Image (cartoon, grey):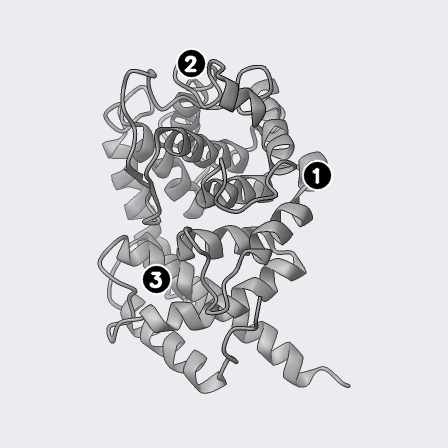
């Protein structure tokens, strides 16, 4: 892998300025988080956060779901916790409870066994604890997650949705549940087999697993450096990842936080900047979420660049 283009402080500053202007306008969750990251939090953001939480709770059904829809419900748990709302029985706890009930249900990744699945240890003989987005007869793919990443095959879609759910319940402090631990151990075992990028497992399955492992408790985080190194090593010279969603990769690596992950994010910034629009966004798909992911990546790259330029020889 050749190094990506050198980071230019002026280009980074200009990108951050465009994002700061973009997030100065909307009164939504990404804007609150972006202003926090920029050190530009407003006195009115606390009241805005409380209003958003009330609106989110009002949309949640008594059973904790968003009209029984899997991805919107998982995303609602993430949204509430990003707003520092761990909730009461009608808030985050109820949403997380609904998500936990998806574990072990028919249709989860790894259900059943075929020769190919068994060979790659992706069957019920080797993995478990995954969340089911729906019965096997119900087609899930292609599916787009809230960050804009698209999973085109059925197996990849069910895997990614489960990792998305796992991240939510881990954020909610449910790591001691046996099935949650089984899911985490399955990811640890699977990443040991990922020596080929774009082989049996789709590239974005590796980034989805990395993101979940990054939130896991210490026993499972021991696998994090190797998982982050594997994803980092697949980076193309332009900073992107062949066959993988750039923003998904940056988001997962930012969560991982290892030295290799941070270096890979810095190398990815030129690819991010190449996609930035004059209004600060990165295209019409999941525009707020991708702008927030890019902002966090660019700010990290700025800090890494500052460290390199100020460190003594």
Q: Nearer the viewer, mark 1 or mark 2?
A: 2
Q: Residues within 10 Å of mark 2 (few under 14, many from 20)?
A: some
Q: Which residue is mark 3?
A: 291
Q: Nearer the viewer, mark 2 or mark 3?
A: 2
Q: Which residue is mark 2?
A: 105
Q: Residue at x 46, y 22 (%)?
A: 100
Task: Work out how far the residue at label 3 is from the one at label 1, CA to CA, in angstroms.
Answer: 30 Å
Mark 1 residue element: helix
Q: Earlier in the sequence, mark 3 or mark 1?
A: 1
Q: Earlier in the sequence, mark 2 or mark 3?
A: 2
**Observer-nearest of 120 and 172:** 120
**Residue 195 point in image, percent of width and height:** 61, 43
**Residue 154 point in image, percent of width and height:** 35, 29
Which disc number belongs to residue 117?
none
Look at the picture and state if 303 lies above or below 249.
Answer: below
Q: Which residue is mark 1?
A: 218
Q: Residue at x 64, y 53 (%)?
A: 229
Q: Are marks 1 and 2 in contact (CB under 8 Å)?
A: no
Q: Residue at x 49, y 15 (%)?
A: 113
Q: Is residue 40 visible?
A: no
Q: Residue furthest toward the front? A: 115
Task: Work out how far the residue at label 2 is from the one at label 3, CA to CA, in angstroms.
Answer: 35 Å
Mark 2 residue element: loop
Q: Earlier in the sequence, mark 1 or mark 2?
A: 2
**Residue 211 point in image, percent of width and height:** 52, 44
Q: Residue at x 72, y 35 (%)?
A: 219
Look at the picture and state if 284 lies above or below 134.
Answer: below
The reply, left or right, for residue 142 in relation to residue 203 is left
Task: Work out how far the residue at label 1 is from the one at label 2, CA to CA, in angstroms.
Answer: 27 Å
Q: Quadrant of the N terminus?
A: bottom right
Q: Residue furthest toward the right? A: 313
The image quarter containing residue 246 is bottom left
């Amino acid at each position: 892998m050749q190094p990506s283009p050198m980071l230019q402080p002026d280009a980074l500053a200009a990108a951050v300025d465009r994002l700061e202007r973009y997030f100065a306008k909307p009164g939504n969750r990404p804007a609150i988080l972006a202003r926090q990251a920029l050190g530009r939090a407003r006195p009115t953001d606390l009241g805005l956060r409380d209003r958003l939480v009330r609106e989110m709770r009002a949309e949640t059904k008594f059973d904790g779901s968003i009209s029984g829809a899997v991805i919107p419900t998982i995303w609602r748990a993430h949204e509430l916790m990003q707003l520092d709302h761990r909730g009461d029985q009608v808030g985050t706890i109820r949403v997380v409870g609904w998500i936990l009930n998806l574990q072990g249900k028919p249709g989860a990744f790894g259900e059943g066994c075929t020769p190919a699945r068994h060979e790659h240890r992706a069957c019920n003989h080797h993995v478990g604890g995954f969340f089911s987005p729906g019965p096997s007869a119900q087609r899930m793919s292609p599916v787009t997650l809230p960050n804009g990443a698209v999973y085109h095959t059925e197996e990849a879609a069910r895997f990614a949705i489960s990792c998305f759910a796992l991240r939510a319940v881990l954020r909610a402090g449910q790591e001691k549940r046996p099935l949650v631990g089984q899911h985490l151990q399955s990811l640890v075992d699977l990443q040991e087999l990922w020596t080929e990028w774009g082989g049996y497992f789709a590239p974005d399955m590796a980034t989805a697993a990395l993101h979940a492992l990054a939130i896991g408790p210490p026993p499972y985080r021991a696998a994090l450096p190797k998982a982050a190194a594997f994803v980092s090593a697949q980076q193309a010279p332009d900073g992107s990842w062949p066959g993988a969603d750039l923003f998904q990769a940056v988001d997962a690596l930012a969560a991982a936080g290892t030295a290799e992950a941070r270096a890979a994010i810095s190398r990815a910034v030129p690819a991010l900047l190449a996609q930035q629009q004059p209004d600060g966004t990165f295209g019409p798909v999941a525009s707020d979420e991708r702008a927030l992911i890019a902002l966090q990546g660019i700010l990290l790259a700025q800090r890494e660049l500052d460290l390199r330029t100020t460190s003594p020889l």
